[in-house]
Amino acid sequence: MKKLSILGSTGSIGTQTLDIVRRDKEHFSVSALTAGKNVKLIEEQAREFSPEIVCMADEGAAKDLKLRLADTGISVTAGEEGLIEAASVKSADMAVGAIVGIAGLAPVIAAIAAGKDIALANKETLVTAGDIVMRAARDMGVKILPVDSEHSAIFQCLLCGSAPEKILLTASGGPFFGKTREELTDITPKQALRHPTWTMGAKVTIDSATLANKGLEVIEASHLFGVGADKIEVLVHRQSIVHSMVEFADGAILAQLGSADMRTPISVALNYPERSKISGKKLDMFSVGSLTFEKPDLKTFKSLRLAFDALGAGGTLAAVMNGANEEAVNMFLSGKCGFLDIADMTEEAMKNHKNIKPPALADIYGADREAREFVRRHKWA
């Protein structure tokens, strides 16, 4: 029996993780759940899975949940302290890091310090503080198992035991593949939220539309697999069948293929080193048809280029890129800036930043705050 602390249980990854637990209660149980403000859903989850502790990031939501769960004996906590308590709860064997944004960093670090293996869906944890997090994991002897479909694919390809010559990271291209900057001037949030392949939360979906998400994944892959920017190549693969590939020194390329179902990479992480059957549509190779791979347009979708720049520079620049992008996406979703402004804001914040190398954790949080404030105080179209 593996006991899980699910950090971000009401989001897309969290709910799909609980679906796997629901279907395999012989092997999994839940020690802790956390969420932001969705009191109704987390109450349902708490009553179904009976965790020891539930945390709401929002203080008001925590008070409401405490009243709702008064008859259960489940401990209800709030804020960052509560998140850290949930992440490091003694009974858990593994923490599932599925909180969106840099808010997921502190709980993941706390879980590592408590000796928990990490099933990591929160890419910002490694984007902002990859060196610190990976060093802590090595020191504690804990595994960081990727949940992103692309990084799970790379992880699976590397199980052959050889070092990668090159990582070939696939991207769907989002809803605006093939468009020029001029054609993207008047894009609305509703249009940007129509992803052609995956069903995800709003933040990740917008990041996929700008290719910022792929940029974050480039940085994450560098930390997870110990390779530099020169050994990572992004390929636009519209069919989303090949989730990523690895090229080896002898020229062989291994790929992982599958349907667009996030429960597969979640299951790989939860069950490692074993594999477990999950229900759902399996990939029918006879119906796949052509598989195409194209170079991304770094001029139109410059968020991807900015990520390579941040990775090459090191230090706190990736934290600035991530924080500025996160703030800009929030502004776009609330109608305060245009679609193209997201990358423009991010680029300006990066130019404005004085990079700190090597950074302490306080420097990373400081860089994140600086980037957000820079975006908020400037006037954009």
Image: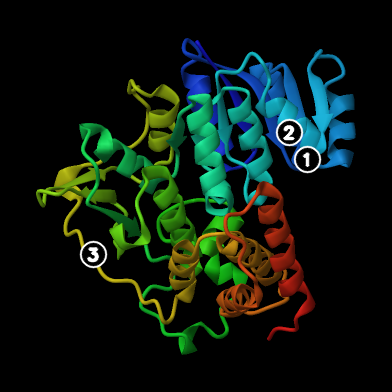
- Which of the 4 image quadrants contains residue 62? top right
- Mark toward the start of the polypeptide (2 vs 1): 1
Q: Residue at x 85, y 14 (%)?
A: 71
Residue 107 is situated, as x and y percent measured from the top left of the image, at 67, 36
For the residue labelled by badge 2, is the local secondary structure a helix, a strand or a loop?
helix
Residue at position x 90%, y 26% in the image: 67
Question: Callout 1: 10 Å neighbours few (<14), some, many (20+)?
Answer: many
Looking at the image, which is closer to me, 185 or 268?
268
Disc 3 to disc 1: CB gap under 8 Å? no
Q: Mark 1 belongs to which amino acid?
A: Ala
Q: Position of residue 250 (x, y in %)?
A: 9, 48
Nearer the observer: mark 2 or 1; the answer is 2
Q: Are marks 2 and 1 in contact (CB under 8 Å)?
A: yes
Report the amino acid beneath label 3.
Answer: Phe
Please give the count of numbered marks on the rendered protein: 3
Which numbered marker is on residue 57? 1
Res. 83 mark = 2
Among the two numbered marks 2 and 3 on one chain, the one whose residue lies closer to the N terminus: 2
Instruction: Look at the picture and state if 27 lies above or below 317.
Output: above
Q: Secondary structure at mark 1?
A: loop
Image quadrant where residue 18 sits: top right
